Image: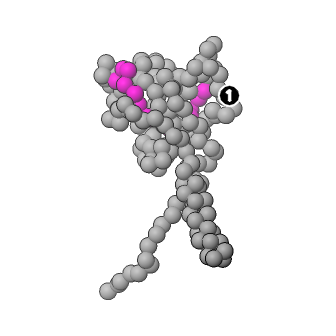
Amino acid sequence: MRMRRTYLSVPLLLAGLLLAACANGPRFDLSGVDNTLTPASAVQDMTRAREHVVHWGGSIIATTNLKDSTRIEVLAYPMDRYGLPDLSTKAQGRFILLRSGYLEGADYAPGRLVSVVGKVTQTHSTRVGEAQAEFPVVQADQLYLWPPNSQSSRTQFHFGLGVGISR
């Protein structure tokens, strides 16, 4: 009887570890999120976008610490099913993420990936090179800084029978 329990507990332990490994990433409250808005569409119709809650993410371009908050410029990408910005797809425009308090610029460095849930509040006019541009501003209620190399280290599992037929 004692051996049988040991044999059963090993597969259960392995299954639990496998599920825990798949459970990484942010646990955002996505209630009330408007999934139809992108940064580009928000800039085109700010009247409609203002006060809508969005779930956006992307690659950090620049981080600026202000007096009472931190402003992060982000190049937005669609997110995969884990909420990770998918850099293999076409960018959706830029947005400004505002977070109350101080965020360390060395941590929130260019190239790092972030995901955010928050309200679109306004647009921010800035220069990109020699061009003037307007970006939507998201007041970040929930923020997740992805670990370095998250895009390349995403664990993928494929299951199949391994049977093929050729003619």
Residue in the picture at 30% in, 22% down: 48
> As displayed, is residue 71 above or below residue 165?
above
Residue in the picture at 46% in, 69% down: 159
Which of the 4 image quarters holds residue 100? top right
- Farthest bottom residue? 167
> As displayed, is residue 150 above or below residue 60?
below
Q: Is residue 156 left or right of residue 17?
A: left
- Farthest top residue? 67
Q: Is residue 148 visible?
A: yes
Residue 167, given in percent of the width and then of the height, sits at 32, 86
Q: How is the image coloured?
A: one colour
The magenta stretch is 49-63
- Farthest front residue? 1
Residue 52, given in percent of the width and then of the height, sits at 37, 25
Residue in the picture at 51% in, 26% down: 140
Front one among 4 and 93:
4
Position of the N terminus by quadrant = bottom right
Residue in the picture at 51% in, 64% down: 157
Classify mark 1: helix, strand or loop. loop
Residue 61: in magenta span = yes
Residue to which mark 1 is pinned = 104
Q: Amino acid type of disc 1?
A: Glu
